[in-house]
Amino acid sequence: MSRTQWLMIGGALLLMVGFGFLVMPKSADALPIRVGILHSLTGPMAISEKPMVDAELLAIEEINARGGLLGRRVEAVIADGASDWPTFAVQAEKLINQHNVATVFGCWTSASRKTVKPVFERNDHLLIYPMAYEGLEMSPNIVYTGAVPNQQVLPALKWGLDVLGKRVFLVGSDYVWPHAINEIMKDQLANLGAELVGESYVFFGSTDLDDTVARIEQVAPDFIISSIAGDSNPAFYQALYRAGINAESTPVVSFSVSESELKGMDPKFVAGHFVVWSYLQNLPSEINAQFIQRFKAKYGADRVTSDVIATAYSSVMLWAQAVEEAESAEVDQVLTALRGQSLAAPEGIISIDASTQHAWRSMTVGQINSRGAIDPVWQIDRPIRPVPFPGSRTQVAWQEMLENMYARWDNSWSNPVERAQ
């Protein structure tokens, strides 16, 4: 080939580059950062977990709108845990090893989290868990952004004993979270000289609550503390209403009913009862008002926000800050950067405790009004240090309690057998 021909080819290539016509292979750095979203989109927990997916997708959209992370878009891979603990584990494995996600935001129930925990530890990967839970756990591969009992359950119990009375009935779904927090509360009830008048568990996903309500009616507690989850909640409040048990006579203090669940309930069944969360939609702050506005702009003016929505959103934003600080999406570097990370969230400041990988969270008692919204009535409006293992028992004793529960349920984190109340 002549020198003239080489010059002509070279000139043509330069023109193609200049006008953007030359197709070059993308570098690895230009590929999207994939993250996993693992929640129940079907089954009894879908009512509570679908809004978490919405919140996580909103956060990812906002991150991409401002240019992504490290010059790369963030891409969500969504998996359905189907309200089934083994399915959660299968989906977690797929997200890590087939979809090669950088992290996973996921789970609601403790049964699902405990089932996927070995998957993340075996693969040395990262789960960010945006839900209040029982504590009694610290995994090097999980960052816990929801509240633990000393930030939610125990302050609520003390408030109830001070305001509502000393005779308490505990009710919950029949899996690890309700059983564990009830053990924690029973220790506290004994220390405070209060009376536990009854305890009852509902088979997970059951809508037959008549036997439980009959037991409550029989012992007439001053108030009820509920850790019933998912689709069982509407049935519980309706059964109470049919039995003539209302918020004036026997109020319920719930750790699992939020604005999202209330959207599907008739206010007459729930008005006057109480809920306890770190975040409520009606908390007054400019950051919260802007968050609500953005959420409604994306999903509709009739949508509501809730603690799990705000926590799921904030979890993605905390991870994004850690990626930027680490200048990497690699698990080990992001995990290091997450420890000590802080965020001005809709509820206030959230920080990740470096020693426990749990979040500092505030706490609010809310009362359901006649429109089905929640009004704050009592608040600890400062971040509370997380204490995953309550001091009423040793860490070894708490671990033994969990191991015995797991063995009793045929190596499962929920009771596999529906039983008579």
Image (cartoon, rainbow, N blue to C red):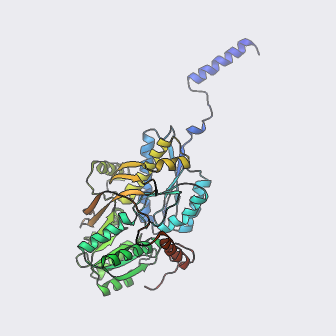
Residue drawn at (45%, 86%) of the image = 420
The answer to which quarter of the image holds residue 229 is bottom left
Residue 157 is situated, as x and y percent measured from the top left of the image, at 32, 71
Residue 206 is situated, as x and y percent measured from the top left of the image, at 44, 77
Q: How many numbered callouts? A: 0
Residue 167 is situated, as x and y percent measured from the top left of the image, at 29, 80
The answer to whether residue 55 is above or below residue 183 is above
Q: Is residue 273 visible?
A: no
User: Residue farthest to the right?
Assistant: 1
Please tell me which residue lies in front, 300 or 414.
414
Please tell me which residue lies in front, 7 or 135.
135
Q: Is residue 282 visible?
A: yes
Left or right position of 241 against 108: left
The answer to whether residue 198 is above or below residue 97 is below
Residue drawn at (56%, 77%) of the image = 407
Residue drawn at (39%, 61%) of the image = 147
Left or right position of 128 against 210: right
Residue 387 is situated, as x and y percent measured from the top left of the image, at 41, 63
User: Residue farthest to the bottom?
Assistant: 218
Residue drawn at (58%, 61%) of the image = 119
